[in-house]
Amino acid sequence: MYFTRGYTFHTYTHSSKRSTANFGIQVQGETDFYGILQQIIEVTYPGTSNLKCVLFKCDWYDPTSGRGVRTNNFGVIDVNANRRYAKFEPYCLASQEDQVCFLPYPRIRERRERWLSVIKVNPRGRIFVGEIEDVSMQVERVVQMSVPTESTENIIHIDPNNQEVEVIADDSTEGSVSEEDEFDAETDEDDTTSDEAETSDSENVTENE
């Protein structure tokens, strides 16, 4: 077991019987290498400085694109579990490693070529923000309220009950009647009506006499 840069690495023999698989290795470069951690080696240099170096011995998959490694339309990377790297270069520095997990695809029948999906593991205690795109998940719409410039002279109101056309006078015109004038007019009409009623009552009394 070795812990570095937020990753916990186990060898394949240690993790093969566990529920967590911490033996997946990735080395990024011009050509990305994917492999399985087989052995953790600590090299100690003699001297007063007490220098140490940790090496990983890995079993690499074939990094050839299209034959050992492929990328689908969704950006998921797969490795061919049946192909291995032909050259003998099993060692690499522990500081160069990133941790990945290899997941098989569920199938009813086994195929001759067995492809494994590569899942990158985020180191503990670190959050990768990445590049922030300007494109939002949901497009925002700004609704602008328009103010009508036409007067109510050209607007025709129809009562849905009697289907009669009601012409609404514009209050902004010069010939408009204010609320006080309407109130005075209604008061005058009431006074006239009451005078007429009194006159008619007096006439009726005279006729009866």
Image (cartoon, rainbow, N blue to C red):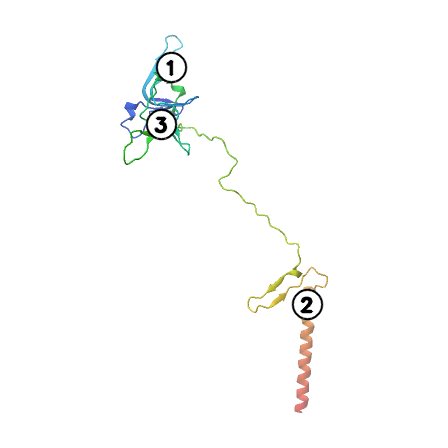
Is 40 located above or below residue 196 in the figure?
above
The structure residue drawn at horizontal position 69% and vertical position 83%, both measured from the top left corner, is 199
Q: Nearer the viewer, residue 117 or 144?
A: 117
Q: Position of residue 166 (x, y in %)?
A: 62, 66
Q: Are marks 2 and 3 in contact (CB under 8 Å)?
A: no
Query: Residue 25 lies in what quarter of the image?
Result: top left
Q: CA distance from mark 1 to mark 3?
A: 29 Å
Secondary structure category for the residue under label 3: strand
Which of the two discs, 1 and 3, sits closer to the camera?
A: 3
Q: Is residue 173 left or right of residue 73?
A: right
Outermost residue on the top side: it is 47
Secondary structure category for the residue under label 1: strand
User: Mark 3 = which residue?
Assistant: 79
Lower sequence index among marks 1 and 2: 1
Q: Quadrant of the C terminus?
A: bottom right
Q: Which mark is residue 8?
A: none
Q: CA distance from mark 1 to mark 2?
A: 100 Å
Is 85 located above or below residue 201 in the figure?
above
Query: Residue 75 lies in what quarter of the image?
Result: top left
Query: Residue 198 lies in what quarter of the image?
Result: bottom right
Q: Nearer the viewer, residue 93 or 103?
A: 103
Q: Nearer the viewer, residue 186 or 14?
A: 14
Q: Quadrant of the N terminus?
A: top left
Label 2 crowd (10 A; few <14 / some 14-19 / many >=20): few
Q: Position of residue 124 (x, y in %)?
A: 39, 28
Q: Which mark is residue 182?
A: 2
Q: Are marks 1 and 2 in contact (CB under 8 Å)?
A: no
Q: Which mark is residue 53?
A: 1
